[in-house]
C-alpha cells in the first residue's frame, strides 16, 4: 500500500461523512497517473502554489492601491489568511483540509490588478463580461502552464468558481462543504483584515464600528474571527451555516465595511485612475493584438482580440500594468 493509499484510508476512517474524499473525486479533465505520496487534492494544492498566477498575487491590490507601508494586505496575504481560516473550520468539522486549502489558495488567481477597480473596468470593457471567480477557473483550466492549465480535480475547480456566490447554500453554490467553507472564510478574512488596514490608514476609527458588531462579534480582530468560526463550527452539519444572531451581525459587518471603507473616497480616491489605466490598456491591445505576448497569440487564434486582451490584462500585477501603460502612453526622455 502506497503512502497516498494509506492517507486515503485514514481520511475515509476519520473524516466526517460529509467530507469529500479524493478517491471519490469526479476526477480531472485529463487522466494522470496517481502520485504514490500525495492525494489528488494535495497534488492540486501544490500545483496552485507553484504556478505563476499565484506568485503574481504578491503585487496585486487587496483594498488600498499601492500602499507605502509594508503592513497593508496584498491579494497574496489575503489568500493566505483565507486558507488559514478555512483550514481551521475544516479541521474542526472533520472535513477534507487538503481540498479546502487547494480551493482557498486558488480562489483569487484570476483577480485583476487594482482590486475590484480593475474588475469593474474589464467588466465594462469586455463583451464577455468579467468576474474574478470565473477568471480564476479560466486560469487553472486554460491559461497556466503554457495553455495546458493545471488540470485540477473537478471539486477544486468548482470551489474556486463558486467562492463568491451570493447565497452559499443555493443552487449554483459550491457542491462540496469544503467549497462552502471557503466561501465563508473569504469573507471572514477580508472583512476583518480590511477593517484593520482601514484603521491603520485612518480611514475610520474603532469608535465608528457599530456597537452591535462589537457586542455580538467582539472588539478585536481576533475576537471577531473566533466568534464567526465558532458559530460556523457549532451550527454546521450537512451544510455550512451560522446561528441567526451571528449571521445577522456578519451581514451588518459587511454593510458597514461597504459603506465606511469599500466606497469611501479616502480609501478609493485613486480608483478612477486605476480603472482608466485598465480601460486604456484594453483599448490598446484590442486595437493592436499582434503586440500581445506570444503566449496569448494562441488565445487570439482560438477566440478573438477581446478574450486575449482580457486574459492578458487580468493577469497583470499592479506595477506591471502601470509599467506597460507608461511605456505605451507616457513620453520617454530622449536619449542620445
Image (cartoon, grey):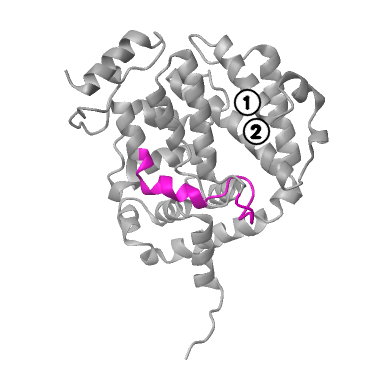
Residue at 19 percent across and 27 percent down: it is 36
Residue 303 relative to residue 309: left or right: left
Residue nearer the viewer, 94 or 244? 94
Residue at 64 percent across and 59 percent down: it is 273
Residue at image mark 2 = 192
- Residue 323 at x, y percent in the picture: 51, 66
Residue nearer the viewer, 92 or 119? 92
- Residue 54 at x, y percent in the picture: 42, 45
Residue at image mark 1 = 225
Magenta-colored span: 48-70
Q: Is residue 66 above or below residue 102?
A: below
**In terms of secondary structure, where does tag 2 sit?**
helix
Between the C-alphas of marks 2 and 1, the distance is: 7 Å
Q: Is residue 45 above or below residue 121?
A: above
- Residue 150 at x, y percent in the picture: 31, 40
Label 2, residues with CA under 10 Å away: few <14, some 14-19, many ≥20: some
Which of the 4 image quadrants contains residue 37?
top left
Note whether residue 153 is visible: no
Residue 332 relative to residue 219: left or right: left
**In terms of secondary structure, where does tag 1 sit?**
helix
- Residue 136 at x, y percent in the picture: 43, 40
Residue 198 relative to residue 54: left or right: right
Note whether residue 4 is visible: yes
Amino acid at each position: 500500500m502506497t503512502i497516498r493509499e494509506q492517507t486515503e484510508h485514514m481520511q475515509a476512517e476519520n473524516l466526517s461523512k460529509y467530507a469529500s474524499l479524493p478517491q471519490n473525486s469526479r476526477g480531472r479533465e485529463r487522466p494522470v497517473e496517481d502520485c504514490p505520496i500525495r492525494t489528488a487534492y494535495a497534488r492540486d494544492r501544490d500545483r496552485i502554489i507553484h504556478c505563476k498566477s499565484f506568485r503574481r498575487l504578491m503585487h496585486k491590490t487587496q483594498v488600498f492601491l499601492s500602499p507605502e507601508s509594508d503592513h497593508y494586505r496584498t491579494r497574496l496575504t489575503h489568500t493566505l489568511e483565507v486558507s488559514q481560516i478555512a483550514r481551521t473550520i475544516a479541521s474542526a468539522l472533520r472535513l477534507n483540509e487538503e481540498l479546502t486549502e487547494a480551493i482557498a489558495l486558488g480562489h483569487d488567481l484570476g483577480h485583476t490588478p487594482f482590486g475590484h477597480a480593475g474588475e469593474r473596468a474589464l467588466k465594462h470593457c469586455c463583451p464577455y463580461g468579467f468576474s474574478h471567480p470565473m477568471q480564476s477557473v479560466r486560469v487553472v483550466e486554460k491559461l497556466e502552464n503554457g495553455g495546458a492549465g493545471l488540470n485540477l480535480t473537478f471539486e477544486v475547480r468548482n470551489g474556486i468558481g463558486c467562492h463568491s456566490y451570493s447565497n452559499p447554500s443555493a443552487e449554483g453554490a459550491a457542491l462540496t462543504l469544503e467549497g462552502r467553507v471557503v466561501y465563508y472564510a473569504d469573507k471572514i478574512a477580508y472583512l476583518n483584515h480590511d477593517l484593520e488596514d482601514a484603521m491603520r490608514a485612518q480611514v475610520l476609527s474603532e469608535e465608528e464600528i457599530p456597537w452591535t458588531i462589537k457586542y455580538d462579534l467582539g472588539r478585536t480582530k481576533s475576537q471577531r474571527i473566533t466568534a464567526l468560526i465558532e458559530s460556523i463550527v457549532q451550527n454546521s452539519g450537512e451544510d455550512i451555516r451560522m446561528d441567526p444572531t451571528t449571521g445577522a451581525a456578519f451581514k451588518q459587518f459587511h454593510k458597514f465595511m461597504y459603506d465606511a471603507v469599500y466606497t469611501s473616497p479616502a480609501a478609493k480616491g485613486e480608483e478612477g485612475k486605476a480603472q482608466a489605466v485598465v480601460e486604456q490598456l484594453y483599448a490598446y491591445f484590442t486595437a493592436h493584438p499582434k503586440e500581445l505576448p506570444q503566449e496569448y497569440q494562441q488565445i487570439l487564434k482560438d477566440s478573438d482580440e477581446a478574450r486575449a486582451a482580457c486574459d492578458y490584462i487580468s493577469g497583470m500585477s499592479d506595477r506591471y500594468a502601470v509599467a506597460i501603460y507608461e511605456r505605451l502612453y507616457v513620453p520617454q526622455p530622449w536619449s542620445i
